[in-house]
Image: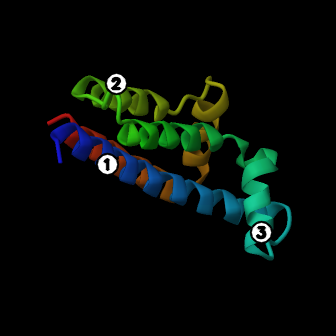
Amino acid sequence: MSDFRTRLKTLHHGLLRLHKSLLELERAAYERDVAPITSTGQYLNLVLDDPAFQWLRELSAFIVMIDEALAQKAPPATDADAERLIAQARGLLSPAEEGIGFARSYFEIMQREAAAVLAHRDALQMMNGLME
């Protein structure tokens, strides 16, 4: 396995962990503030359609971009592709109080959930390891 594939797989895995953590935190907030989620099907529908989870779709779409780069056969993904995706991930994971979309919601969840701050820290450490 080439270095760039290893780096992309590491990025993919780390972002999936972050995504899972953020989903769990949003689920807990939804159940606390709106209503209990009683089935996996209901949860999936909420993740796909409810505004409370909409902000996470940008991260979901980015993870799919990494999947596509890893699956790309002709031409195969390159070191430059890996560098570009790592840089994009770093930009995406930049919470912003004055931002919009993902950046704003990411900032907000980190203000209210210590677990989000820890998941963010882990994602940054993973990305920093990809730059060495």
Residue under circle 3?
41
* Coordinates of residue 64 in the picture (x, y in percent): 51, 42
Q: Residues within 10 Å of mark 2 (few under 14, many from 20)?
A: few
Name the secondary structure under disc 2.
helix
Residue at image position (44%, 44%) is 67
Residue 89, position as x, y percentages in the image = 41, 33
**Helix or strand or loop: what does disc 3 sit on?**
helix
The residue at which mark 2 appears reads as 84
Disc 1 target residue:
9
Between discs 1 and 2, the one toward the N terminus: 1
Q: Left or right of 48: which side holds 111?
A: left
Q: Residue furthest right?
A: 35
| Label 1 residue SS | helix
* Residue located at (21% from left, 43% from top): 129
- Residue 52, position as x, y percentages in the image: 76, 48
Instruction: Decide which of tag 3 and tag 1 comes sooner along the chain.
Output: 1
- Gap between marks 3 and 1 measured at Cα: 29 Å
Q: How crowded is mark 1: few (under 14 residues within 10 Å), some or many (20 or more)?
A: some
**Residue closer to the observer: 13 or 90:** 13
Whichever of labels 2 and 3 marks the residue nearer the N terminus, that label is 3
